[in-house]
Image (cartoon, rainbow, N blue to C red):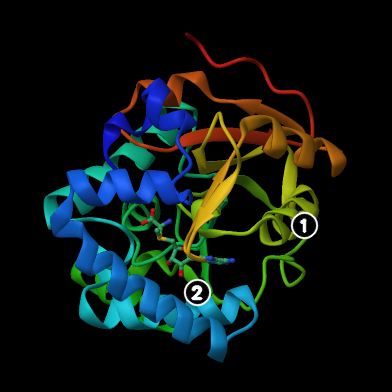
Amino acid sequence: MPKDARSPKKLRSNRAALTHKARYALSHPERVVPHLRRAARDAWLRLRHPDHVGYYRAVMASDARRDPEAAVGSRSHDRWLALGRMQFDYLVEHGLRPEHRMLDIGCGNLRGGWRFIDHLDAGHYYGIDISPDILIAAKRTLTERGLQAKLPHLTLTGDLRLDFLPDGHFDVVHAHSVFSHSPPQVIDECLGGVGRVLTRTGFFDFTFDRTEGAEHQVLREDFYYRTDTLLSLAARHGLHARFMDDWEKRPHGQSKIRVSRSPLPAPPL
Ligand SMILES: C[S@@+](CC[C@H](N)C(=O)[O-])C[C@H]1O[C@@H](n2cnc3c(N)ncnc32)[C@H](O)[C@@H]1O
């Protein structure tokens, strides 16, 4: 997503509306054919996989086989490195220490993950994903970075209930660019489980595609939420939630929310 995605105009646009699509096609004619290809794939995969996880797993299978770095949303290797560094620097600035235990939801091919694995003590990184293809690519990243001795957990999951993980275990839970591809029921399920696996002082950071207009989705791949919707959802699960203003300064199209079991001190301005 381009970094001007947070401009006031973009924050109000509804990408699912016909008028938006027509205007977009006129100003970006080169993107019409790729979009039509995605729409055809969407229609076919919807038929084959009525459930969202099955559908998105199939999307990842098709994208990851071609190029795992593009499958997690990076146009180039340099961008893949930069996006991983952005995630890493932010969490280290927010206090991530080697002795902490971290759960990376939708870890992909370890764009941020390899840096977290390197930073954390052995066995303290736990990555989960719904895509077997991207987890195979994750193991390749781990090998290329020579991080075998860090013994990270990389686990395939079919849902986000997190019921196979222990109570009060993780200091940091992280989901980067995952809820931007998730319908409300998946986010609800995750928020329903995350409080149990967090330590009392831990937090869960997730990014999302923010809209200040009508909530909408593009195909079944991209979902746009209002901040209040997600803050209220977290509150319904008895969690504290806060919009992270300092993330807005980073050159990234998505916004970030932090969720915790107990109220947390405000980050430094
Ligand atoms: C855009 S990629 C981001 C990957 C990684 N977080 C990063 O920043 O590089 C989204 C990842 O989330 C995974 N994913 C999507 N929906 C998921 C879900 N419901 N549960 C777990 N993983 C999911 C996808 O398979 C994919 O690997």
Q: Quadrant of residue 117?
A: bottom left
Tell me if 115 is positioned left or right of 32 in this view.
right
Residue 204 x/y as whole percent: 62, 42
**Quick check: is the Cβ at mark 2 less than 8 Å away from ligand 1?**
yes
The CA distance from mark 1 to mark 2 is: 21 Å
Residue 32 falls left or right of residue 228: left
Label 2 crowd (10 A; few <14 / some 14-19 / many >=20): many
C-beta proximity under 8 Å, tags 1 and 2: no
The circle drawn on residue 56 is 2
Q: Which amino acid, mark 2?
A: Tyr
Number of other residues with Cα within 10 Å of mark 1, as a class: few under 14, some 14 to 19, many 20 or more: some
Does any atom of ligand 1 lie closer than 8 Å to the CB of label 1? no
Provide the residue designation for mark 1.
Answer: 193
Dividing the image into 4 quarters, which one contains the N terminus?
top left
Closer to the N terminus: mark 1 or mark 2? 2
Residue drawn 29% across and 30% down?
4
The kind of secondary structure element at disc 2 is: helix
In the image shown, does 33 or 244 lie closer to the viewer?
33
Pinpoint residue 138: horizontal percent, then vertical percent.
34, 72
Percent x, y of residue 33: 21, 68
- Left or right of 253 in this view: 164: right
| Secondary element type, mark 1 | helix
> Residue 267, relative to residue 105: is it above or below?
above
Q: Residue 71, labelled with which disc? A: none
Q: Quadrant of residue 75?
A: bottom left
**Residue 109: quadrant of the picture:** bottom left
